[in-house]
Image: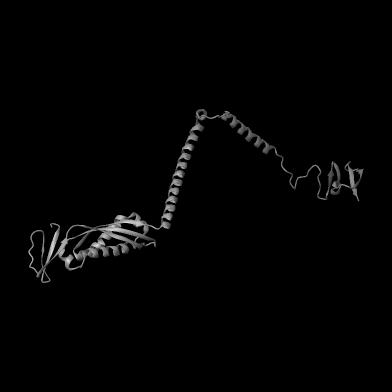
Amino acid sequence: MEYERAVVFRLGRVVATRGSGLTLLIPLIDRMARVSLRTVTMNVPAQDVITKDNVTVKVNAVVYFHVVVPLLSVTVVENHLVATSQIAQTTLRSILGQVNLDDLLVDRDAINQRLQAVIDEITSAWGVKVTLVEVKDVELPDSMRRAMARQAEAERDRRAKVIHAAGELEAADDLGRAAQVLDQHPAAMQLRVLSTMAELTSERSSTVIFPLPVELLRLVDTVHHKLTETAVTATPDRLGPDRLGPDRLGPDRTGTVGGRAGTLDDRRPGINHTSGPTAATGRHTVTARN
């Protein structure tokens, strides 16, 4: 066949490698081994792999290869198909054990190229060329799937909160600029109130609106501030320790009580009092007796 090559042995020694066409063999002396040059698609069975971050997964792959040197594939290795399959399985476990789970799930292309380079370097001595290695499926444990689902949900919630906060910030900025414009143009506030009333009345619901002028609110606020300032200004100062009230006492604990001279004991209830005029002051002197 055109896609086959024949390796001819004569008395156990390699004579030649023949292609398609007529090949003459000497009976009992020559022996011929056929080798296919077509690309072989080989499934790698699922392998239990422990990744670099200690996660156990099952991974299977597919390997594409073909024979480029028929003589080596016959004389160097007994069965190049079985040998390529075994080296693909061991290399798959070895390479995937050096990467993290996230890299295995995301960066498939780099892992495939690394697998192809390692396997091809080994099989090149057998006359086999590995053209492509693809990781087919990564089977995760149920607990890891649930953990990844929770992680993805938390990440989506975080993004939603960040977007919502950014929207609130932009809205607050726009509202600040709008407030400045409305403050410079009072009539615009009235137009905004009328627009809001129109939006409320457009709905099919019973809504009662009591319009209240904004100027009235401002007037009430101004009057309130003025009354507060007047009350604070009119509040009398409290008597200090150096000020005496209507009933004042001197340093000798005597003074006037109700306009009359006396001592501190005159203010105590349940005391007998006698009074008499004095010649010096013209006032009545009050003497406390027990």
Residue 134, picture quadrant: bottom left
Q: Is residue 189 visible?
A: no
The image shows residue 253 at horizontal and vertical percentages of 83, 50
Q: Nearer the viewer, residue 159 or 55?
A: 55
Residue at horizontal 33 percent and vertical 59 percent from the top: 59
Left or right placement of residue 101 versus residue 15 in this view: right
Instruction: Pick the quarter of the image with the N terminus.
Output: bottom left
Residue at horizontal 65 percent and vertical 37 percent from the top: 228
The image shows residue 26 at horizontal and vertical percentages of 7, 67
Q: Nearer the viewer, residue 233 or 82?
A: 82
Q: Nearer the viewer, residue 199 or 9?
A: 9
Left or right placement of residue 45 versus residue 73 in this view: right
In this picture the colour scheme is one colour
Q: Is residue 74 visible?
A: yes
Q: Residue furthest front?
A: 27
The image shows residue 227 at horizontal and vertical percentages of 66, 34
Q: Does residue 28 sit above or below 212 in this rendering?
A: below
The image shows residue 73 at horizontal and vertical percentages of 18, 65
Mark count? 0
Q: Residue furthest bottom?
A: 11
